Amino acid sequence: MSKNRGMKSKKICGIYKLVIGKYYYIGASLNCFHRFRAHWSRIRHGSSSPKIMKAYNEYGWIRIEILQECSEDQLSAVEMNILSTCMKDELCLNTRFGTGGAGRRSSETRKLLSTKAKSRKWSDQTKEAISRGQVESWNWRRKYETEQFLFSRI
């Protein structure tokens, strides 16, 4: 079996539905199967949204359905259209409308973010901790602990 364990490797841009027992979550992505793997990873590590985790803990399985393929330009509009009807359903696990970041950032946005990151100032304590290797990578699991470490020393 291939590395992706039977998942289609075709890149599909569109709207997907995660089905967890009787519950479901609607999402949009430039690559639906890659996004599904990201969801699955977060569920396995227990860091997905509380609603998704509760449904998964209750039913113990998850699957993906492609609801609609569309172009990158149509992604947000199609997702909003589908969510407008689904959000009323008590079985829908979505907590808000809208795409959380699907699509690519404009070149202006990328330049602005780059400039902002380059101008970031680190405190002397933070620089010292980084040089001693006491600060682990900014990984989502350790972010809170790391921030607490840095702020407790300032």
Image (cartoon, grey):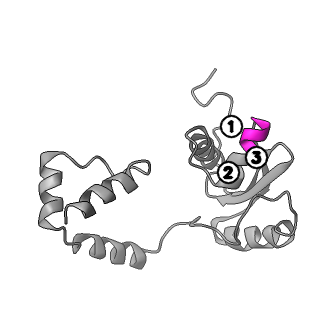
Q: Where's residue 55, x and y in %?
A: 76, 46
Residue drawn at (43%, 51%), measured in percent from left and top? Answer: 140
Considering only vertical position in the picture, is 154 above or below 143?
A: below
Identified by mark 3, the residue type is Ala
| Highlighted magenta segment, given as a residue range | 55-60
Q: Residue at x 59, y 37 (%)?
A: 44
Residue drawn at (51%, 66%), measured in percent from left and top? 104
Q: Can see residue 125?
A: yes
Calculate the distance from the C-alpha at mark 2 to the C-alpha at mark 3: 26 Å
- In the rendered view, tell whether residue 28 sits above or below residue 21: below
The part of the image, by quadrant, that contains residue 2 is top right
Residue 46 located left or right of residue 78? left
Q: Is residue 56 magenta?
A: yes
Q: Within 10 Å of the Cα at label 2, are there few (<14), some (14-19), or many (20+) other Cα atoms?
A: some
Q: Is residue 9 left or right of residue 119?
A: right
Q: Nearer the viewer, residue 83 or 108?
A: 83
Seen at 71% across and 72% down, the residue is 97
Q: In the figure, residue 45 lies in which quadrant?
A: top right
User: Mark number for residue 12?
Assistant: 2
Q: Are marks 1 and 2 in contact (CB under 8 Å)?
A: yes
Instruction: Check if mark 3's residue and mark 1's residue have beta carbons within 8 Å.
Output: no
Q: How many marks?
A: 3
Q: Nearer the viewer, mark 2 or mark 3?
A: 3
- Give the labeled residue for mark 3: 55
